[in-house]
Image (cartoon, rainbow, N blue to C red):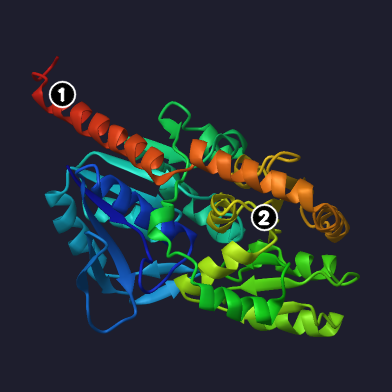
Amino acid sequence: MRVLHFYKTYYPDSVGGIEQVIRQMCVGTGRLGVTNDVLTLTRQKENFDFEFEGHRVRRVPLDFEIASNAVSFAAFGELARMAEQADVVHYHFPWPFMDLAHFISRVNKPSLVTYHSDIVRQKHLLRVYQPLKHRFLKSVDAIVASSPNYLASSQVLERYQDKTRVITYGLDKSTYPAAKQELMDKWRARVGERFFLFVGVLRYYKGLHILLDAVASSDYPVVIVGSGPIEAELKAHAERLGLKHVLFVGAVGEDDKAALLTLCYAMAFPSHLRSEAFGISLLEGAMYGKPMISSEIGTGTTYINIDGDTGLVVPPSDPQALGEAMRKLWDNPQLAADMGKRAEARYWELFSSETMASNYLALYEELAARRAVTQLAPAGA
């Protein structure tokens, strides 16, 4: 079984949530005998073809971007060539150029799309894109939603319920480095014994301005890991509020991230828009046995974090409610510890990479077998 994944960014150029999911899919299904290839775009001028953790990555030059929509003319031919070698083509939505490439490259293999998120921000361009989007979603053989919450709340997926199924994301903790004592000592000396942690790319939908407002009247230490488009804006906001107890540490390596996930008291995950379809770093917190605070936005964040059980869920864009949730966890260490234990148990029950990989392998095999039956059927049958 050979599977081709197609998405605009991937390791090592970008290490966001979707990239992590694709990585976990490739590593997990690879252990089950799948040969995975990833076709992606890059701004680099060299090293276009390489092996990464047991799968092959093929990068083609990124020519330009329009409203975050990456375009590569070389991708058309490369997609056609690599799809011809694959048994199944696995697309990762949203990426409008991908939809166009699917048709221009005349891909004629069993295909599925993991529907990572609705398009939320570019509303005017979305109206122009709608016909292509629906033609693409109609053309693929299967659509996968990452949580039952997202399937139930997406108006787009509502149109395709007959071909949509749920396969939740999964993480393999063995791919994360063990926390090194010297790094834990370094971070403990820098941030203290107890702190709230956020990990992620600093984007508009992450709600970090809400988190900053929430701690303006408290002194709870908060560590923000990550860089991104609104980093300067967030730092300026924190400075205006005089937040000496909020520490922006930028992007960190995997070893430092493991140390911070091990040390932190709880995860603060204030994403307030549906662009946050799941929350991989929230799931990392559960994997490390941490209680979580998140917002109810009708997506997978509330499938990971169950209010009152694995953490607390608050209304979106509500700094007061977020601050009260932080206070509740901070003032009740036993409650926080119990929630963290239940969060880790839920991770092992529902969100391991083994579960995700076996579910995707079953879908790949189903789609390939369905195509084989169709091709063997006599004409006019």
Of 149 and 245, the residue lying toward us: 245
Please, which residue is most extreme toward the right here? 217
Q: Quarter holding the C terminus?
A: top left
Q: Is residue 263 left or right of residue 280?
A: right
- Upstream in sequence: badge 1 or badge 2: 2
Task: Look at the numbered disc 1 and give the secondary structure of its residue.
Answer: helix
| Mark 1 nearby-residue class (10 Å; few <14, some 14–19, many ≥20) | few
**Res 301 seen here:** yes
Look at 62% across and 65% down and name the residue there. 263
* Residue 249 x, y percent position in the rendering: 62, 80
The residue lying at 64 percent from left, 41 percent from top is 342
Q: Is residue 163 left or right of residue 215?
A: left
Q: Which amino acid does label 2 sit on?
A: Leu
Q: Residue 120 is drawn in which quadrant?
A: bottom right
Q: Which amino acid does label 1 sit on?
A: Val
Q: Residue 226: give its label.
A: none
Coordinates of residue 43 in the picture (x, y in percent): 34, 80
Residue tagged by mark 1? 373
Q: Alpha-carbon distance for marks 1 and 2?
A: 42 Å
Q: Residues within 10 Å of mark 2 (few under 14, many from 20)?
A: many
Please tell me in which quadrant of the rendered image residue 165 appears: top left
Residue at 20 percent across and 33 percent down: it is 368
Report the residue marked by disc 2. Answer: 273
Q: Is mark 2 on a helix, strand or loop?
A: loop
